[in-house]
């Protein structure tokens, strides 16, 4: 792994046709993407589409039942889970929360808290924080350990619109300053962080993927959300032409029902995002290059 | 003025309170009070088996409590019944099987009340060695396991994502519980061990500013309860276990008085809510 031309092309994490099954049901299947250093990948999709499952599989909390997940040896992960409730009986200040999974220097704690604007709350008990403050404290904890890969499961939940923009701005700064890879799960199907390199839309499988960058510059978007939002958010405009029924079958736009819809079948349809994807040479292509680079590495190792 | 047996009970009881404090904190943080009860109740089965097979009492109780906790883990994984239903089944079955076996053994005389509620007269010097030896072992293990145990208490997935092993931490925690139950049984009694774990920890919560402070405070409060309870037991000729629990309860009630409330209020205002 060391004799690579550039460290950039060795992904931190790479999922190949990964699937997770529980109680004889596939939670998610056929997931393919990779995250390299300095890259931001955003997972979107409806509730129950397997976003959290995919993220947990990527960092090794869940084991894939098919396909494979390759992680860089010694990968240091910083994780902000979707749900975290600290029992009232546990006296835990923001400051103590910071060293939950490993020791840190006082300076590192201060820096991380200052970066998320939580320094003044260092002595507060976490149970007394508001939703947004708690999210920022969790983010501070995750970045304080200087991870290679930051995994944020709906980091803007419970945060108002301007807080959301500020948080995305902060995530961008973290990426630019530390060069870590970021896997972001967005609670919104259509609005993602503008700095995202790749958007992966899940619906039990990878429905579609693209880049949101150019969209955020479009006049329609600026009219809709204003200039300030344009720096941080982007519309990922896409349209699903099939629905997953409760019994596992798939209803297509033309009214037909099939037993399954295979990943990569092309049962989806992009509007703007697809066009952007096609016409910008450094979006999807760069990503593919990285994937190919990794495939070669895998073969060499084997 | 103090008798030898009383000094022995005091030394043993304080030793137990020291380990029960930090372990009890995890029991309430992880909401495992009923789980602790189940393990403790299974101790009577351990007592019965020790008499039947002529095994060392503490070793037998430790093994049975460990087996019951592993059995629970296995049944939880199968997921057919909810955890509290499983606990109810295991807890009372183990206790009843123990009582039935004891009833069959007409050739042994057994002080059932002593096992159920504790008996300060029963503490020998060898017991003190085991209690302090085992206690120091438990404390060392807790210090070693502290970070993964605390992290997986807050969120097991977060702990695992960041390179820890929550399953292993949980397994060791159960073994430590079984060990404490085995060594604490003689003093507080099978039915009351969990209260020595929980009440001092709950009392400590009101004054604690961090998990570590809470663990140390719980130990000190437990030691105070043991001392007060044993003196009461000697004075009024009451069983040692219930007397210690009553003393612990008295301290808990004291912690609810205005001094405790002021402490909490200052925390709350600091937190900005």
Image (cartoon, coloured by chain):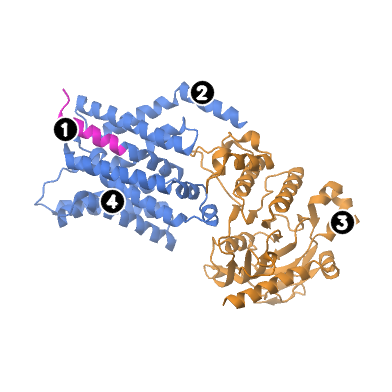
Task: Determine if marks 3 and 4 fall on one subunit.
Answer: no
Secondary structure under tag 4 reads helix
Residue under circle 1?
B5
Task: Determine if marks 2 and 1 fall on one subunit.
Answer: yes
Q: Residues within 10 Å of mark 2 (few under 14, many from 20)?
A: few
The chain displayed blue equals B
Q: Residue at x 55, y 37 (%)?
A: A93
Secondary structure under tag 2 reads helix
Q: Residue at x 42, y 32 (%)?
A: B204
What chain is tagged by disc 4?
B
Secondary structure under tag 3 reads helix
Residue under circle 2?
B262
Closer mark to the observer between disc 3 and disc 2: 3
Left or right: residue A232 compared with residue A70? right
**Does A51 appear above or below A99?**
below
Whether tag 3 and tag 2 are in contact, CB under 8 A, the answer is: no
Task: Determine if marks 3 and 2 fall on one subunit.
Answer: no
Task: Determine if marks 4 and 2 fall on one subunit.
Answer: yes
Residue under circle 4?
B42
**Does A51 appear above or below B259?**
below
Give the residues drawn in magenta, as a range. Answer: B1-16
Looking at the picture, how far across and down is residue A58, in whole percent? 60, 63
Whether tag 4 and tag 1 are in contact, CB under 8 A, the answer is: no
What chain is tagged by disc 1?
B
Comes first in the chain, label 4 or label 2: 4
Location of residue B253 (image quadrant): top left
Mark number displayed over residue A217: 3
Colour displayed for chain A in the image of the structure: orange
Whether tag 3 and tag 4 are in contact, CB under 8 A, the answer is: no
């Amino acid at each position: 792994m060391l004799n690579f031309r550039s460290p950039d092309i060795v992904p931190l994490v790479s999922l190949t046709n990964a699937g997770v099954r529980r109680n004889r049901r596939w939670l998610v299947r056929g997931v393919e993407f990779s995250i390299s250093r300095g890259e931001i990948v955003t997972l979107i999709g409806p509730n129950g589409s397997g976003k959290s499952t995919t993220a947990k599989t990527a960092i090794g909390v869940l084991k894939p039942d098919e396909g494979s997940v390759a992680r860089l040896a010694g990968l240091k992960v910083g994780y902000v889970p979707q749900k975290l409730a600290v029992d009232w009986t546990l006296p835990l200040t923001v400051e103590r929360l910071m060293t939950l999974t490993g020791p840190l220097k006082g300076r590192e704690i201060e820096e991380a808290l200052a970066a998320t604007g939580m320094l003044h709350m260092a002595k507060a008990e976490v149970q007394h924080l508001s939703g947004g403050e708690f999210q920022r404290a969790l983010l501070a904890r995750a970045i304080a350990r200087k991870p290679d890969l930051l995994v944020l499961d709906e980091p803007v939940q419970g945060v108002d619109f301007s807080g959301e923009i500020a948080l995305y701005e902060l995530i961008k700064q973290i990426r630019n300053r530390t060069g870590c890879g970021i896997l972001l799960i967005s609670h919104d199907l259509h609005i993602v962080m503008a700095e995202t390199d790749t958007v992966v839309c899940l619906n039990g499988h990878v429905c579609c993927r693209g880049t949101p960058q150019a969209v955020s510059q479009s006049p329609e978007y600026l009219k809709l959300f204003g200039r300030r939002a344009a720096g941080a958010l982007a519309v990922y405009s896409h349209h699903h032409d099939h629905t997953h029924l409760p019994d596992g079958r798939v209803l297509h736009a033309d009214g037909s029902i099939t037993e399954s819809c295979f990943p990569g079948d092309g049962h989806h349809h992009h509007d703007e995002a697809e066009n952007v994807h096609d016409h910008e040479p450094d979006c999807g292509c760069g990503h593919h290059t990285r994937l190919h680079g990794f495939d070669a590495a895998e073969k060499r190792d084997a | 003025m103090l008798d030898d047996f009383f000094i022995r009970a005091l030394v043993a009881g304080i030793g137990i309170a020291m380990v029960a404090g930090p372990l009890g904190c995890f029991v309430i943080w992880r909401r495992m009070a009923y789980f602790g009860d189940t393990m403790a109740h299974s101790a009577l089965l351990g007592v019965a088996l020790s008499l039947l097979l002529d095994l060392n009492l503490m070793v037998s109780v430790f093994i049975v409590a460990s087996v019951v906790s592993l059995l629970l883990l296995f049944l939880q994984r199968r997921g057919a019944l909810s955890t509290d239903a499983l606990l109810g089944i295991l807890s009372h079955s183990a206790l009843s099987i123990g009582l039935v076996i004891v009833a069959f053994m007409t050739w042994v005389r057994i002080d059932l009340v002593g096992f159920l509620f504790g008996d300060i007269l029963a503490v020998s010097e060898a017991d003190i060695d085991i209690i302090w030896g085992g206690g120091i072992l438990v404390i060392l293990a807790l210090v070693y396991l502290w970070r993964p145990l605390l992290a997986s208490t807050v969120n097991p997935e977060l702990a695992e994502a960041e390179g820890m092993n929550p399953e292993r931490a949980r397994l060791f925690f159960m073994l430590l519980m079984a060990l404490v139950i085995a060594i604490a049984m003689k003093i507080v009694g099978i039915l009351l061990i969990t209260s020595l774990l929980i009440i001092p920890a709950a009392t400590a919560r009101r004054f604690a500013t961090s998990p570590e402070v809470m663990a140390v405070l719980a130990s000190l409060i437990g030691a105070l309860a043991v001392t007060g309870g044993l003196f009461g037991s000697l004075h009024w000729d009451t069983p040692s276990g219930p007397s210690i629990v009553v003393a612990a309860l008295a301290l808990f009630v004291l912690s609810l008085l205005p001094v405790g409330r002021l402490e909490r209020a200052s925390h709350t205002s600091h937190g900005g809510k």
